[in-house]
């Protein structure tokens, strides 16, 4: 969580005890560079690839702005070096760049 990024809010519309719809308020903008460093996603991934037995890497972000084209390229390169298969949820706008 970062102070300059809105947390996703999900509001459900219920009528007569039945779920009718859901209204989401969220941002899909990429994390600001200063916040990307804070999350240390690249170093966490590198550390896990170095110290753990990884069978597959699956990218899932649902266009929330955390997985950037840069992260995809870096992780993909690391995975290729270790012959780790990569999969992705196709909802992401960035996966056509890989």
Image (cartoon, rainbow, N blue to C red):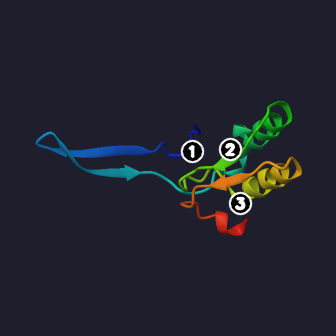
- State the residue position of label 2: 35
Residue 71 drawn above or below residue 93: above
Instruction: Look at 54% across and 60% down and name the residue there.
Output: 91
- State the residue position of label 3: 69
Residue 66 position in % (x across, y down): 62, 49
| Secondary structure of residue under mark 3 | helix
Instruction: Look at 55% across and 56% down and name the residue there.
Output: 63
Instruction: Look at 65% across and 48% down and name the residue there.
Output: 58
- State the residue position of label 1: 4
Residue 16 position in % (x across, y down): 10, 42
Are the residues flagged by discs 1 and 2 in contact, CB closer than 8 Å? yes
Q: Which mark sits nearer the N-terminus, 2 or 3?
A: 2
Please identify the residue farthest to the left as the structure is shown.
16
Q: Which mark sits nearer the N-terminus, 1 or 3?
A: 1
Q: Nearer the viewer, residue 31 or 60?
A: 60
Residue 65 position in % (x across, y down): 59, 53
Are the residues flagged by discs 2 and 3 in contact, CB closer than 8 Å? no
- Residue 37 appears in which quarter of the rendering? top right
């Amino acid at each position: 969580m970062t102070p300059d990024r809105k947390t996703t809010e999900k509001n459900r519309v219920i009528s007569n005890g039945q779920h009718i719809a859901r209204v989401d308020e969220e941002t899909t903008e990429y994390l600001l560079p200063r916040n990307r460093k804070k999350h240390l996603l690249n170093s966490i991934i590198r550390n896990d690839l170095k110290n753990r037995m990884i069978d597959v890497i699956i990218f899932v972000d649902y266009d929330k702005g955390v997985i950037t084209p840069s992260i995809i390229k870096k992780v993909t390169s690391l995975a290729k070096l270790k012959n780790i298969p990569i999969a992705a949820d196709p909802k992401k706008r960035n996966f056509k760049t890989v």
